[in-house]
Amino acid sequence: MTSSAEITCAVCGQPAEESTSALCGECDRPFHLNPRNDVDGRDCGEVWVDEQFLSLRFACFTCLRPDADARSGRPSGRGEATASESSEPPVGKQH
Ligand SMILES: [Zn+2]
Ligand SMILES: [Zn+2]
């Protein structure tokens, strides 16, 4: 019995199976989510436990990182430079 419901990942656009996908809590669209670490699978989103509601929350990468396409594959290394800059006192009338 083949599942009649076809799922398409909202992040990568590839077909997904119900057992390896989840529904994003933000955009309400399905995305790849590998429920097991010991099985090779695709992750197009994240799942975490909401401490307020004590329930699992799902979010696709599209919602987590709206600009992921523009800077895909880029590590957030530039944050350090910004951090050291902001460690200085705000620019005032010190000069
Ligand atoms: Zn996907
Ligand atoms: Zn989403």
Image (spheres, rainbow, N blue to C red):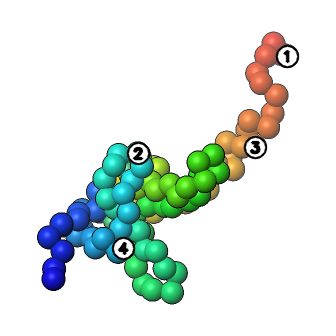
Give how far apart the Cα atoms at labels 4 and 3 are.
Answer: 41 Å
Q: Secondary structure at mark 1?
A: loop
Q: Which residue is mark 4?
A: 20
Q: Which residue is mark 2?
A: 26
Disc number placed over residue 52 in the picture, else none: none
Which mark is in front, 4 or 3?
Answer: 4
- The kind of residue on which mark 4 rests is Thr
Q: Which residue is mark 1?
A: 94
- The kind of residue on which mark 2 rests is Glu
Give 35 or 69, whichever is nearer the viewer.
Answer: 35
Q: Secondary structure at mark 2?
A: loop
Q: Residue at x 69, y 50 (%)?
A: 80
Give how far apart the Cα atoms at labels 2 and 4 are.
Answer: 18 Å
Earlier residue among tags 1 and 2: 2
- Does any atom of ligand 2 lie closer than 8 Å to the CB of label 2? yes
- The kind of residue on which mark 1 rests is Gln
Position above or below: 20 against 65: below
